[in-house]
Image: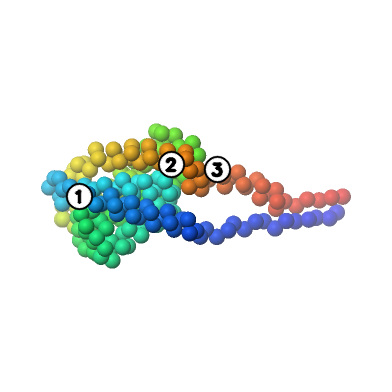
Amino acid sequence: MTASTHPARTPAPRILSVRDLAQIAIFAALIAALGLPGALSIGAVAVPITFQTLGVMLAGAVLGARKGFFAVLLLLALAAAGLPLLSGGRGGIVWFTTSPSAGYLYGWLLGALVIGYLTGRLLPRYRLWAALCATALGGVVVIYLIGVPFTAINLGLPIWVALVDAAKFLPGDLVKVVVTVLVARQVHKAYPGLIPTRRHTAGAAPADATAGAVTTTP
């Protein structure tokens, strides 16, 4: 008997292409541009309402977890370095440390990551209600879970006071969720493949397994 074996394929390293870097830069610029109208402060706690959360949600829903995360990270890194890229022309490390809204900025990173990951699981079909739930989970629940405790700590407030005050964000954020899903749905319909899907990877597995199998002949 003779046996022939084929070495299993090793996956290519996941590096960012020039196209990926361009998309990351474009969405970082989009998030910055959504801060140009400024911020609106409502309520007792000095956490402003901005349009930039919409850009964060779009980054995750359109680019996916990895590129969406890096787009938000790029914006925040530049803002922390002092560039006036946050809403109302704010910038500097103080907005990431002692500011009441510092936690929401960190929440943007995890929110884009969660939205991107869940969107990748939904594609290629991207059902409307599932997408709304996924985007609301990452863009509202996750961001609030990080933002509210930071607000309470930095202002010395009970957590429930900060949570109640955060309710002022909810109607606007839910509108942003709807807008994000409607935009992302059209983008993925027009440009499929922006986010690698697990189904494509799973479909390739049997071929790899066959290629690595041992065949025998008498």
Name the amino acid, label 3. Answer: Arg
Name the amino acid, label 2. Answer: Val
Mark 3 touching mark 2, by CB under 8 A? no
Residue beneath the point at 78% across and 50% down: 215
Q: In terms of sequence position, does the residue under pointer 2 or pointer 1 come before the other?
A: 1
Query: In terms of depth relative to the viewer, which is nearer, 96 or 141?
Result: 96
Query: In terms of depth relative to the viewer, which is nearer, 165 or 54?
Result: 54
Measuring from the top left, give residue 70's x and y in whole percent. 40, 57
For the residue carrying disc 1, how many other residues have a C-alpha within 10 Å: few (<14), some (14-19), or many (20+)? some
Q: Which mark is residue 199?
A: 3
Q: Give the quadrant of the N terminus.
A: bottom right
| Residue 182 seen anywhere in this rendered image of the structure | yes
* Residue farthest bottom in this picture: 81
Measuring from the top left, give residue 101's x and y in whole percent. 22, 54
Residue beneath the point at 59% across and 57% down: 11
* Residue farthest left in this picture: 44
* CA distance for labels 3 and 1: 41 Å
For the residue carrying disc 3, how many other residues have a C-alpha within 10 Å: few (<14), some (14-19), or many (20+)? few
Name the amino acid, label 1. Answer: Ala
SS assignment at label 1? loop
The label nearer to you, 3 versus 1, is 1
Q: How many marks?
A: 3
For the residue carrying disc 2, how many other residues have a C-alpha within 10 Å: few (<14), some (14-19), or many (20+)? some
Residue beneath the point at 21% across and 47% down: 49
Q: Is residue 134 left or right of residue 145?
A: right
Q: Which mark is residue 187?
A: 2
| Residue 146 seen anywhere in this rendered image of the structure | no
SS assignment at label 3? helix
Q: Which mark is residue 39?
A: 1
Q: In terms of sequence position, does the residue under pointer 3 or pointer 2 come before the other?
A: 2
